[in-house]
Amino acid sequence: MTAYLLRRFLSLSLSLVAASLVIFLVMEVVPGDPASFMMGINADPQAVAALRTQLGLDEPLPLRYLGWVAGLLQGDFGVSYTYRVPVSELIAERVMISLPLTLYALALSTLIAFPAGILAASRRNSAADLSVMGATQLGVAIPNFWFAMILVLVFAINLRWFSAGGFPGWDAGFWPAIKALTLPAIALALPQASILARVMRSSLIDTLNEDFMRTARAKGLSRGQALRRHALRNALIPVLTIIGLQFSFLLAGGIIIENVFYLPGLGRLAFQAITQRDLIVVRSVVILLVFAVIVVTFLVDLAYALADPRLRRRRT
Amino acid sequence: MTAASPDRSFLRAALGHPAFVIGFALSLLFIALALVSFVWTPFDPTKLAIANKLKTPTFEHWFGTDHFGRDMFSMIMVGARVSIAVAFVAVGIGMLIGVPLGLYAAARRGSLVDEVIMRGNDLVFAFPSLLLAIMITAVFGPGAVNAIIAIGIFNVPVFARLARGAALSLWTRDFVLAARVAGKTRARISAEHILPNIANLLIVQGTIQFSLAILAEAALAYVGLGAQPPLPSWGRMLADAQTLISLAPHMALFPGFAIIITVLGLNLMGDGLRDLFDPKLRRGR
């Protein structure tokens, strides 16, 4: 297990380094000089040069990369060109919306997908199974931002149950904040719930066909008992992997959904930064999300290895 | 050897597979709309007629008009062209780069090159596709070409992994061994024996990726990073509709339906093809 952990940890570190290198280099090829962009077209060349030095843009590329990574390790993302405040402050503020939204959507997706998948698998080829499968086909075909607009039309504009967008802040209390995140979370959860329900169904069907399920029935357990005690537990392993992967889809999908609902999260921060060419902010949001994805994938792998000793051996 | 008979049996099986038939028909419908838009649309989709704005569907304007009085049906027809073109080229890029990479990795399995290719794939996968697209458009500016590149890059590891995985199991088969004994090079074996045997898998995955690419293109266009005006695009039509949704819901409904029906059709066709290509399932029907 120790050897496995070491190997996985090494590959995790390598992925993080590679990802940071790619992001750094991509942002380096951007046409235009950030310093002259910040100062405007009529700026005094001397002032621009001074700003370049202040921003560290004069140093050679490898040195700037190392400086950036050293900063990242200390939680220092640099200073935003446009907001003139540390990017880490901007991000800390926005994460408090994007992360709860992601977790909310993940919870909804699981809550919808589990019963649907179990129902479909345990009554295979029934009308219930066919409706679940039909609904999931539709669920993956609907763009979530369009679904979000329809939710706004129905529940915010016509029924007035929710507000159409914006966020009151966590200071306004827990429930108002959760209420503001509800429609976005539903929109975000829909395609993921469809995928998860399909995985749940096929995984459970595979397990139900196993020999140990026949044994369980033979020793006198009812269908429901055998399903609960033996099938579900074994069927959950692939499902948990998908849930881990969905974290990254939801985090990235939130970028678009935040724009539909005018939620001041990481996604809106990134888009505003793109239009203002505030590349330090863009770079920071991108690397934060990519790191989150890599670390979550690592944790899922680890949980998987804990659950199934066979997987600790080297992948071929 | 009667070459015609397996094809005919495939055709018969395909026609007896309802999901495939529906999916194929829906996909064909949108390809037809896109093709017809080159020679004919009911109205000029870029022509503004403010006096005629925000009309709900009428006999003249089947899907109504938008806030500039443009004919929505004509815009959806031309939008189909943009969606299909972007998705087709993006998936094509993914296949043309990914499949050879995967085949090469499989032919040199266990080597350093294999390891580098696979870890490179993992790295691209770690970037959520949308994030990758946003980063690329942030750097190179918005536009259809950059949307294609962004979606295409994400497709490369999908096809590389699929090709490698499928090819690996084929390399242990007797007919490949026979080809090796006959003195064929790895490259020739990959091209002549491995590739034809994984073509079915690639076609099925290609169909699924095509539908994902259409969704991705719509999302990018919606946030303003896809095809630029005056070219109509489904995603941007939805962005225009958003502020007017209480006033003119039809502006949001029709482009949404266009996306859903196209994606649904492609997915059904992909699932159907998967069933049809799997001989075990075919015999069972």
Image: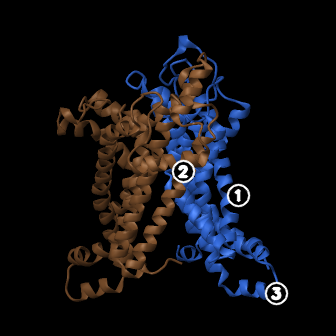
Q: Disc 3 residue type?
A: Ala
| Mark 1 nearby-residue class (10 Å; few <14, some 14–19, many ≥20) | some
For mark 2, name the chain: B
Residue at the top extreme?
A: B51
Task: Judge from the rendering whether residue B245 lies leftward or rightward of residue A222; answer left or right.
Answer: right
Q: Residue A46 is drawn in which quadrant?
A: top right
Q: From the top left corner, tell me how far across and down residue A242 is, in percent.
A: 40, 62
Q: Disc 2 residue type?
A: Leu
For mark 1, name the chain: B
The brown-tinted chain is: A
Residue at the right extreme?
A: B183
Check disc 2 and report its element: helix, strand or loop. Answer: helix
In the rendered view of the protein, which quadrant contains the N terminus of chain B?
bottom right
Residue shown at the point (20%, 82%) measured from the top left: A221
Residue A143 visible here: no
Q: Are marks 1 and 3 on the same chain?
A: yes
Q: Disc 1 residue type?
A: Leu
The blue-tinted chain is: B
Question: Mark on residue B47?
Answer: none
Check disc 3 and report its element: helix, strand or loop. Answer: loop
For mark 3, name the chain: B
Residue behind mark 2: B212
Residue behind mark 3: B182
Q: Residue A85 is drawn in which quadrant?
A: top left
Residue behind mark 1: B96
Q: Which of marks 2 and 1 is in front?
A: 1
Query: How far is the residue under mark 2 from the one under mark 3?
Result: 42 Å
Residue shown at the point (30%, 57%) measured from the top left: A110
Among the two numbered marks 2 and 1 on one chain, the one whose residue lies closer to the N terminus: 1
